[in-house]
Image (tube, helix red, strand yellow):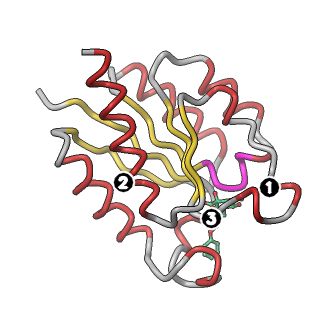
């Protein structure tokens, strides 16, 4: 049976493609989903793709990924990246490898975006590659899973 990867998107990412194209590009979240599914299929992985504006729902989904035996999580926690100890604890509390993704280069932006509560507990972090970062995260995860055997 194909392994499942949860791809979780945080607050306001449902607005992708509608505003701030200079920062986030013109692709919509649906485009991100299509790209992610194609990248996953090329590694024989299946995708559970979700977005929420609610911190607790994202925490629940991280727990669900563990409970359902997901092979990995790709997480763009949006602004919760910079504020949420609850999300950090959720990531630290599961054994599923988590790859943190950001569309923009958070280190080239405002200082408050330079801090990620997720990065220290993530398996890896990618930022600044636009939506291509989601595909790169899937490839990185596939390499980790292959190495594990
Ligand atoms: O670069 C990223 O992927 C971010 O996670 C996006 C978050 C931001 O708070 C993080 O610092 C970096 C914001 C997502 C909101 O996206 C919008 C897209 C279009 C219009 C409005 C918001």
Q: Residue at x 52, y 44 (%)?
A: 75
Ligand 1 within 8 Å, label 3 CB? yes
Tags 3 and 1 touching, CB below 8 Å: no
Dominant secondary structure, magenta: helix
Give left or right: position of 118 versus 50. right
Callout 1 environment at 10 Å: few (<14), some (14 to 19), or many (20+)? Answer: some
Task: Answer with mark 2 or mark 1, whichever residue precedes in sequence.
Answer: 1
Q: Which residue does the image show at 53% across and 79% down from the upper left?
A: 25
Q: Which residue is mark 2?
A: 135
Which residue is the site of mark 3? 104
Q: Which residues are magenta?
A: 77-81
Q: Which residue is mark 1?
A: 113
Point out the residue furthest to the right here: 111
In the rendered image, residue 110, in percent from the top left (x then y), is placed at: 85, 64
Q: Secondary structure at mark 2?
A: helix
* Mark 1 residue CB less than 8 A from any atom of ligand 1: yes
Label whose residue precedes the other's in the sequence (3 or 1) = 3
Closer-to-camera residue (87/23):
23
Disc 3: CA contacts within 10 A as few (<14), some (14-19) or many (>=20): some
Q: Residue at x 46, y 26 (%)?
A: 97
Q: Is residue 50 magenta?
A: no
Element type at mark 3: loop
């Amino acid at each position: 049976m194909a392994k499942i990867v949860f791809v979780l998107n945080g607050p306001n990412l449902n607005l992708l493609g509608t505003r701030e194209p200079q920062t986030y590009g013109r692709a919509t979240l649906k485009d991100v989903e299509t790209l992610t599914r194609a990248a996953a299929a090329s590694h024989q992985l299946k995708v559970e793709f979700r977005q929420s504006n609610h911190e607790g729902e994202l925490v629940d989904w991280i727990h669900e990924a563990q409970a359902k035996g997901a092979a990995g999580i790709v997480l763009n926690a949006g602004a919760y990246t910079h504020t949420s100890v609850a999300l950090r604890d959720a990531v630290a509390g599961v054994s599923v490898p988590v790859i943190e993704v950001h569309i923009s280069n958070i280190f080239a932006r405002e200082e408050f975006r330079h801090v990620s509560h997720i990065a220290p507990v993530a398996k890896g972090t990618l930022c600044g590659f636009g939506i291509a970062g989601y595909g790169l995260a899937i490839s990185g995860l596939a390499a980790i899973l292959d190495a594990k055997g």
